Image (cartoon, rainbow, N blue to C red):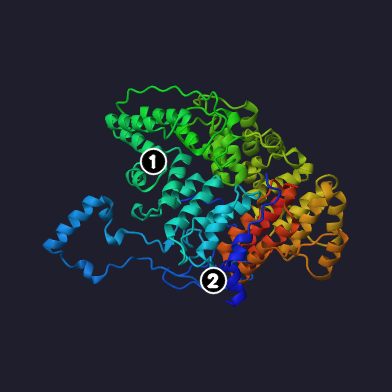
Amino acid sequence: MRRGDAALLGVSGALLLAVAIPVVAQGGPESLLPPGFGDPEPSTPAASQPGPSSSSSSGASGSGGSGPSSSATNLVPPTALALPSTGDLANMAEAEEKDPAVYDLPPTARRSLDQVGPLTVESGGVSPGAYGAVRGEFLTHVMRASRAPFVSRWASITLRRVLLSGTATPSDVNGADLAAERASLLLRMGEADAARLLVQSVDAANFTPRLYAVAMDTYLATADPAGFCPLAPEAAVRTDDPRWPMAQAICASFSGDQGTASSLLNQAQRRGRLRGIDYRLAEKAVGSGPNSRRSVKIEWDGVDRLDNWRFGLATATNVEIPAPLYPGATSGFGDALRAWEARAPALSLTRRLAGVTTAARLGVFSGDTLVGYYARLGDPTDDQQPPASLYESFRLSYAGETVGERIKGMRTFWTMVPADGAALGPGGVSFAALPVLSRAAAALPPSAEAGTDTPWLLAAMFTGGYDRNAARWVRAVDAMEGEGRERAWALLAVGLPDTSAGVGRDRIDAFVEADASEDKVASHMLVAALMGLGRLQGDAASALLTDLDMQVASRSRWAQAIALAAQHRQKATVALLAAVGMQARGWAQLPPEHLFAILSAMRQVGLEAEARMIAAEAITRL
């Protein structure tokens, strides 16, 4: 790597302070991809040194960059096979008294911090060297400073896969601390279960104070206070977090030791470590243990904010949280709290509806999971029933006897006000509804009967990654007239694996003429997307930039960093920078040059399919 490159991706003091994190307009894990989406990454032997690889014509490539690799097996040194002497046994007993956790795992079962993460290339992750030679200081800073959720659902899906991958730990950072930052970012993205998988990829003996804090947040996000218990004794000693002594009281109650639980609660109350609603929720959790005689009534009067402690314990004990507290959440997790609620097992299906809606919009839930959820909403055993029209329109979308009935069901479903209160988008369409309908839309034959619903059917397909199904609609879109024709064409132009929909100047001009968005932002994004995907180049691209008085080149530190990461085939670095480059209140506030830089970089490192879905998302939401 050239000296200039090393200074940039090695994070000199100037770049670290300027931070490659643009914030615009501030205010086993389940696969989310359908079968056949994109191309699988070539597998790399676990023990080999990962290195740069060039993109193939199909758009798939291995993750490049050099970096430390770790063997798949932890070898036991020959000396470990020798029998201990009497003196050794005495020393071992003394050490175990001081730290009982030291010998919980035999050497062969301990996991290295050199490579942390449950996903492998074979299971959908990126290669160990996908960050290349990027320093851990840079990764830690970018992850910690990132404001999630991100504006793009597909950027979030891509980053989730990267953060869960077993990537090599840079030499300048502790593997447990980096895992903590990865898990914390996943939590802010709404990915509670993914964060838990990552936290559990580190042995308890290797936990650091930072990982203890993130582990606490993770088990609260999953509404699983029992998850505290293996960590609580050590965490209470090694950290100053006042929640861990309370966790010890909860765990003592769960094990039936009500005397210890009461003593710890009383001690915490005397010291004033937790007060008010926070203390009462801990009492409530203690009261849920066996043999407990505590009965605690939770009242939210005077509570003006919701944080992860309150969310986790209230959800775990089936205490209903007042809806007005969600928009005012000040824990740094925002919409993520709703997404956590979507997978809370203690809540009824209907009480989870708002959370499921948010999880669909953020990309936390796959289409299959969403279909399974809505199919169960009609279950009469649920304690509360959702609006009948919601379930009926969903049922018609998938089981209507005719194409017309199915389209009508989808139209009704996607125009309903979202349960989480999010605003409807262009055309009065709820973006959170489209992933639910992606399979239903993909199953439809191309039909003129779709009419003005055609662009939203295509948008649903691209939201679920069904690009091959969308390709069957090229002729139907060509034959369209009137409203919706240009949006439908634009979706095909950026979302299909090829240019069969056509990207001629006449089609682009027709889109620009029909564009009713403020300041022609949709037209600017279309041109940026086509250029980023390599479908609009040379004189034709220059002429359009001039005519629209726009530019796609950016000299920002962030743009330089993502371009350089792409040049060195660092797939994980590109995915991370792509997501953080999408920190905006909405798509209308995202600069076109950001979209161009992101799509161009993703295409270079073999994420071309994901780049196309992000481009289609931009056309859908503007």
- SS of the residue at dot 1? helix
Q: Nearer the viewer, residue 100 or 537?
A: 100
Q: Position of residue 532 (x, y in %)?
A: 72, 63
Left or right of residue 111: residue 532: right
Within-10-Å neighbours for mark 1: few <14, some 14–19, many 20+: many
Residue 269 location, quadrant: top left
Rendered image: mark on residue 244: 1
Q: Residue at x 15, y 64 (%)?
A: 84
Residue 406, compared with residue 363, is above or below; it is above
Q: Quadrant of the N terminus?
A: bottom right
Q: The disc labelled 2 sits on which kind of residue?
A: Gly
Tally the numbered discs: 2
Name the one closer to the observer, 587 or 605: 587
Q: What residue sits 22% from the left and 53% below the top?
A: 96
* Image position of 233 with respect to 11: above or below: above
Circle nearer the N terminus (1, 2)? 2
Residue at image location 40% in from the left, 44% down from the top:
240
